[in-house]
Image (spheres, rainbow, N blue to C red):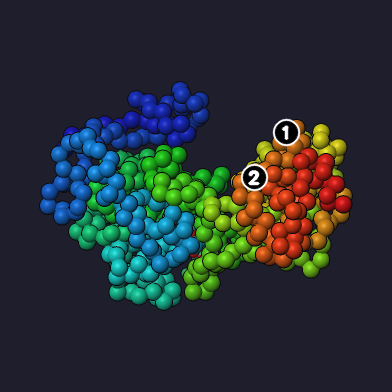
Amino acid sequence: MAKAKTAYVCSDCGAEHSKWQGQCVECGAWNTLSEFVVQPAAKPVVAARGTGYAGAASGSPKVTSLTAVALAAEIRTLTGIGELDRVLGGGLVDGSVVLIGGDPGIGKSTLLLQMLGTLGAQMASVYVTGEESLAQVAARAQRLDLPLAPLHALAETCIERIIEQALASRPRVLVIDSIQTIWTELLTAAPGSVSQVRESAAKLTRFAKETGTSVFLVGHVTKEGGIAGPRVLEHMVDAVLYFEGESGSRFRVLRAFKNRFGAVNELGVFAMSEKGLREVPNPSAIFLSAHSGPTSGSAVMVTREGTRPLLVEVQALVDQSSLGNPRRVALGLEQNRLAMLLAVLHRHGGVAAYDQDVFVNVVGGIRVQETAADLPVLLAVLSSLRDRPLPEKTITFGEVGLSGEIRPVPNGEERLKEAAHHGFLRAIVPRANAPKKGKVGDMDVVAVERLSQGIDACR
Ligand code: TYD
Ligand code: MG
């Protein structure tokens, strides 16, 4: 066999170099180049004939009308775990590659094993474990009360041998736990290195597409919060799901970060119990902390991540700073947005926080990415600064613009209904989101157009 050609690829920007160097010429990042195999042409991993798989690549590709393709595409199977199906966009798609990331111990292995258990005899599956022994996997499956007979596992880390085994046992679902432990014989780099991870993932992706097998890759998360390995891993797969949650809280949130088959930012909510992960089908109020009375520095917002509204509490703590450069810390929100909001608060609300440390946190360890959090964040900050709670049973949402205007957010009516349903009595929302009669059920709706009006509404 001829020696495979290698190239050096930057893990930040993906630029290719013919030899190793300390700095990437394209993006200027240091120490990001690592070795990769250059594939001469997309050679199928599976020999076309004799595998018996439908859709195995045969001959060279031909131009095809999409009407002929669309009918055959996207066969979905429900996994039996409703919240997972929701995040996947309505079930598992044949031949799709899904990357699941999350902190260690958050429940990635548990969720996937439970999924294979509920798929059971419906779909043949193989669970490839590179981290735990077969005995550990079996013990966990037993503890989770899963049917053991349809569960097939393989303890292997070499990608060539995994594919060989998969071709022999022909599963319809293949779980790789985790991609960081997998290595290919083609490269000399250590397992877990960027090049090994990328090359192994590329092989698995090709395998999935050629055989119609659904592949799940478990990925570890680095300290910075990204999936370890190059960004290219995220480009290569069909869906990227992140498992989030606060340590200490039993709730876990699975979020679609990218999905070629469904909505992004869709959330699935689970609770970790002694019998594994349980679904939380109506999660709208679990992210509220149970205060016995009004507390300053707390605002409840209605976020709409994915396709359903969620009530979430935003907390702020504003404290006299001893630093020349006061701290702005945002957990579950974007840091830069917080700095921007504080500037708007100063210019258009007349409230200065330049000598204050500002900490903002979203309760429950979930992440709110939409701009509807702007107004709740500012009201929570203001409430903490003045040590005065917001009026009781109040919800709020709305985007804040740089000129101090409050802009509407999508699906206002649905958010208001959800809040009224949970017994809230007052809502402070953008004018365009407020109903004309000023009420939703028993809840009064205060419409605001400027930040100053929002601040007045809290008195
Ligand atoms: P695990 O799925 O191993 O996490 P990951 O694969 O993401 O690293 O989850 C392990 C954690 O979940 C561990 O801290 C124990 C806890 N757990 C339960 O609370 N109940 C259970 O039934 C199981 C299987 C795990
Ligand atoms: Mg694990």
Pick the front one: 171 or 221: 171
Distance from mark 2 CB to nearest ligand 1 atom below 8 Å: no
Mark 1 is surrounded, within 10 Å at the Cα level, by few (under 14), some (14 to 19) or many (20 or more) other residues, namely: some
- Given the image, on which type of amino acid does mark 1 rest? Leu
* Residue farthest along the top direction in this orientation: 25
Question: Looking at the image, which residue is at 46% across and 46% down?
Answer: 258
Residue that numbered label 2 is attached to: 409
Question: Looking at the image, which residue is at 51% across and 29% down?
Answer: 29
Does residue 56 appear in the picture of this structure?
Answer: yes
Q: Quadrant of the N terminus?
A: top left
Residue 67 x/y as whole percent: 27, 43
- Given the image, on which type of amino acid does mark 2 rest? Val
The Cα atoms of the two marked residues, 1 and 2, are separated by 16 Å
Taking the image as shown, residue 341 lies to the left or right of residue 242, namely right
Disc 2 is placed on an element classified as: loop
Q: Which corner quadrant of the image does residue 40 belong to?
A: top left
Residue that numbered label 1 is attached to: 402
- Check the image and report above or below for 421 versus 324: below
Does residue 103 appear in the picture of this structure?
Answer: no
Disc 1 is placed on an element classified as: loop
Question: Looking at the image, which residue is at 78% across and 39% down?
Answer: 450
Of the residues under marks 1 and 2, which one precedes in the sequence?
1
Question: Looking at the image, which residue is at 28% across and 40% down?
Answer: 66
Q: Which corner quadrant of the image does residue 152 belong to?
A: bottom left
* Residue farthest along the left direction in this orientation: 50
Pick the front one: 444 or 359: 444
Residue 42 x/y as whole percent: 24, 37
Residue 59 x/y as whole percent: 15, 39
Residue 459 x/y as whole percent: 87, 52
Taking the image as shown, residue 191 lies to the left or right of residue 305, namely left
